[in-house]
Protein backbone atom coordinates (compact mmCIF):
# COMPACT_ATOMS: atom_id res chain seq x y z
CA UNK A 1 0.00 0.00 0.00
CA UNK A 2 1.12 3.51 -0.76
CA UNK A 3 0.13 5.98 1.97
CA UNK A 4 -1.67 9.05 0.68
CA UNK A 5 -1.32 12.30 2.56
CA UNK A 6 -3.02 15.63 2.02
CA UNK A 7 -5.44 15.82 -0.87
CA UNK A 8 -6.85 12.66 -2.32
CA UNK A 9 -8.22 13.69 -5.67
CA UNK A 10 -8.07 11.57 -8.80
CA UNK A 11 -5.01 13.41 -10.09
CA UNK A 12 -3.19 12.77 -6.79
CA UNK A 13 -3.81 9.04 -7.07
CA UNK A 14 -2.67 9.06 -10.70
CA UNK A 15 0.54 10.95 -9.91
CA UNK A 16 1.33 8.60 -7.03
CA UNK A 17 0.76 5.49 -9.17
CA UNK A 18 2.79 6.88 -12.08
CA UNK A 19 5.70 7.70 -9.73
CA UNK A 20 5.47 4.27 -8.08
CA UNK A 21 5.65 2.46 -11.42
CA UNK A 22 8.41 4.73 -12.78
CA UNK A 23 10.59 4.31 -9.66
CA UNK A 24 10.45 0.55 -10.18
CA UNK A 25 10.87 0.69 -13.97
CA UNK A 26 7.51 -1.01 -14.49
CA UNK A 27 5.72 -0.24 -17.74
CA UNK A 28 2.38 1.25 -16.71
CA UNK A 29 1.08 0.70 -20.26
CA UNK A 30 0.82 -3.02 -19.43
CA UNK A 31 -1.95 -2.35 -16.90
CA UNK A 32 -5.24 -3.61 -18.31
CA UNK A 33 -7.48 -3.43 -15.23
CA UNK A 34 -7.85 -1.58 -11.96
CA UNK A 35 -9.84 -2.28 -8.80
CA UNK A 36 -10.94 0.60 -6.58
CA UNK A 37 -13.41 1.47 -3.87
CA UNK A 38 -16.43 3.59 -4.70
CA UNK A 39 -15.25 7.04 -3.63
CA UNK A 40 -15.76 9.91 -6.10
CA UNK A 41 -12.04 10.62 -6.41
CA UNK A 42 -11.67 7.12 -7.83
CA UNK A 43 -14.76 6.86 -9.99
CA UNK A 44 -15.52 10.47 -10.94
CA UNK A 45 -16.72 10.71 -14.54
CA UNK A 46 -14.20 13.36 -15.65
CA UNK A 47 -11.46 13.72 -13.07
CA UNK A 48 -11.69 10.46 -11.13
CA UNK A 49 -8.60 8.26 -10.95
CA UNK A 50 -9.99 5.59 -13.29
CA UNK A 51 -10.90 8.13 -15.98
CA UNK A 52 -7.53 9.88 -15.66
CA UNK A 53 -5.72 6.54 -15.85
CA UNK A 54 -7.62 5.66 -19.04
CA UNK A 55 -6.53 8.98 -20.55
CA UNK A 56 -2.94 8.55 -19.36
CA UNK A 57 -2.74 5.04 -20.80
CA UNK A 58 -4.67 6.09 -23.91
CA UNK A 59 -6.79 3.00 -23.30
CA UNK A 60 -10.57 3.36 -23.21
CA UNK A 61 -10.83 -0.42 -22.78
CA UNK A 62 -9.20 -0.39 -19.33
CA UNK A 63 -11.26 -2.70 -17.13
CA UNK A 64 -12.43 -1.08 -13.92
CA UNK A 65 -13.75 -3.09 -10.99
CA UNK A 66 -15.43 -1.80 -7.86
CA UNK A 67 -14.46 -3.70 -4.72
CA UNK A 68 -16.87 -3.37 -1.81
CA UNK A 69 -14.56 -5.09 0.67
CA UNK A 70 -12.31 -2.80 2.71
CA UNK A 71 -8.60 -3.57 2.42
CA UNK A 72 -8.31 -4.23 6.15
CA UNK A 73 -10.98 -6.91 5.87
CA UNK A 74 -9.10 -8.56 3.03
CA UNK A 75 -5.90 -8.63 5.03
CA UNK A 76 -7.59 -10.00 8.14
CA UNK A 77 -9.05 -13.04 6.42
CA UNK A 78 -6.10 -15.36 6.80
CA UNK A 79 -5.65 -18.80 5.36
CA UNK A 80 -5.81 -21.79 7.69
CA UNK A 81 -2.04 -22.41 7.56
CA UNK A 82 -1.24 -18.79 8.32
CA UNK A 83 -3.73 -18.78 11.21
CA UNK A 84 -2.06 -21.85 12.75
CA UNK A 85 1.36 -20.20 12.54
CA UNK A 86 0.01 -16.94 13.93
CA UNK A 87 -1.66 -18.71 16.88
CA UNK A 88 1.59 -20.48 17.80
CA UNK A 89 3.63 -17.29 17.48
CA UNK A 90 1.17 -15.35 19.66
CA UNK A 91 1.21 -18.14 22.25
CA UNK A 92 5.02 -18.07 22.41
CA UNK A 93 5.20 -14.27 22.49
CA UNK A 94 2.59 -14.21 25.27
CA UNK A 95 4.60 -16.80 27.23
CA UNK A 96 7.67 -14.60 26.97
CA UNK A 97 6.00 -11.26 27.68
CA UNK A 98 3.18 -12.08 30.11
CA UNK A 99 5.48 -12.90 33.02
CA UNK A 100 7.77 -10.04 34.07
CA UNK A 101 10.60 -12.37 35.11
CA UNK A 102 10.40 -14.30 31.82
CA UNK A 103 10.35 -11.07 29.88
CA UNK A 104 13.39 -9.56 31.62
CA UNK A 105 15.26 -12.87 31.36
CA UNK A 106 14.49 -13.05 27.65
CA UNK A 107 15.69 -9.49 27.06
CA UNK A 108 18.94 -10.22 28.93
CA UNK A 109 19.31 -13.46 26.96
CA UNK A 110 19.04 -11.51 23.68
CA UNK A 111 21.67 -9.01 24.90
CA UNK A 112 24.07 -11.84 25.76
CA UNK A 113 23.65 -13.31 22.29
CA UNK A 114 24.12 -9.86 20.73
CA UNK A 115 20.85 -10.34 18.91
CA UNK A 116 19.61 -8.04 16.15
CA UNK A 117 16.59 -7.14 18.31
CA UNK A 118 16.19 -6.65 22.03
CA UNK A 119 12.67 -8.04 22.38
CA UNK A 120 9.69 -9.69 20.71
CA UNK A 121 6.69 -7.61 19.66
CA UNK A 122 3.23 -8.00 21.16
CA UNK A 123 0.46 -8.81 18.70
CA UNK A 124 -2.75 -6.78 18.89
CA UNK A 125 -5.99 -7.76 17.21
CA UNK A 126 -6.88 -4.11 16.69
CA UNK A 127 -4.32 -3.55 13.94
CA UNK A 128 -4.10 -6.19 11.23
CA UNK A 129 -0.76 -4.76 10.15
CA UNK A 130 0.76 -5.74 13.49
CA UNK A 131 0.54 -9.42 12.51
CA UNK A 132 3.15 -8.95 9.83
CA UNK A 133 5.44 -7.02 12.16
CA UNK A 134 5.13 -9.64 14.91
CA UNK A 135 5.91 -12.45 12.46
CA UNK A 136 8.83 -10.57 10.92
CA UNK A 137 10.42 -9.92 14.30
CA UNK A 138 9.65 -13.45 15.54
CA UNK A 139 11.32 -15.10 12.56
CA UNK A 140 14.28 -12.71 12.73
CA UNK A 141 15.07 -13.99 16.23
CA UNK A 142 13.60 -17.48 15.83
CA UNK A 143 16.88 -19.19 16.75
CA UNK A 144 17.22 -17.15 19.95
CA UNK A 145 13.59 -17.86 20.86
CA UNK A 146 14.07 -21.62 20.47
CA UNK A 147 17.17 -21.48 22.69
CA UNK A 148 15.28 -19.48 25.32
CA UNK A 149 12.30 -21.85 25.24
CA UNK A 150 14.67 -24.79 25.76
CA UNK A 151 16.03 -23.15 28.93
CA UNK A 152 12.45 -22.84 30.20
CA UNK A 153 11.68 -26.45 29.20
CA UNK A 154 8.86 -25.24 26.97
CA UNK A 155 8.23 -27.27 23.86
CA UNK A 156 6.78 -25.86 20.69
CA UNK A 157 7.77 -28.45 18.05
CA UNK A 158 6.51 -26.36 15.13
CA UNK A 159 9.15 -23.70 15.79
CA UNK A 160 11.86 -26.23 14.90
CA UNK A 161 10.11 -27.24 11.66
CA UNK A 162 11.53 -25.16 8.80
CA UNK A 163 8.52 -25.83 6.56
CA UNK A 164 6.34 -24.20 9.23
Image (cartoon, rainbow, N blue to C red):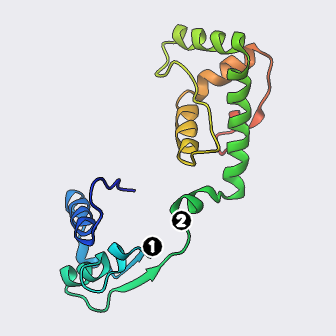
Q: Secondary structure at mark 2?
A: loop
- Where on the picture, by quarter, is residue 145? top right
Residue shown at 77% from the left, 34% from the top: 157
Where 104 falls versus 162 (above or below)?
Answer: above
Q: CA distance from mark 1 to mark 2?
A: 8 Å
Q: From the image, tell me which residue sits under label 2.
A: 70
- Badge 1 element: loop
Give the label on residue 25, or none: none
Taking the image as shown, residue 25 lies to the left or right of residue 117, namely left
Answer few, some or many: residues within 10 Å of disc 1's Cα (few below 14, many 20 plus, some between 14 and 19): some
Front-lying residue, 105 or 11: 11
Evaluate if marks 1 and 2 touch, with contact meaning CB atoms under 8 Å apart: yes
Residue marked by disc 1: 37
Q: Is residue 155 above or below residue 70?
A: above
- The relative height of residue 91 versus residue 25 in the rendered view (above or below) is above
Rendered residue at 59%/61% (across/down)? 73
The quadrant of the image that shows the N terminus is bottom left
Q: In which quadrant of the rendered view does residue 41 lie?
A: bottom left
Mark positioned earlier in the residue sequence (1 or 2): 1
Tell me residue 121's x, y (percent).
57, 29
Residue 29: x %, y % from top left: 23, 78
Crowdedness near tag 2: few (<14), some (14–19) or many (≥20) residues, C-alpha within 10 Å? few
Amino acid sequence: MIPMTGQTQGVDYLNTIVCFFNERSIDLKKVFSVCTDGCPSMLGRNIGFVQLLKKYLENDNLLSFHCIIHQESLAVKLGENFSCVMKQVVKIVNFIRSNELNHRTFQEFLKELISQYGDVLYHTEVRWLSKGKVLERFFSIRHEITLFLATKEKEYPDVYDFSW
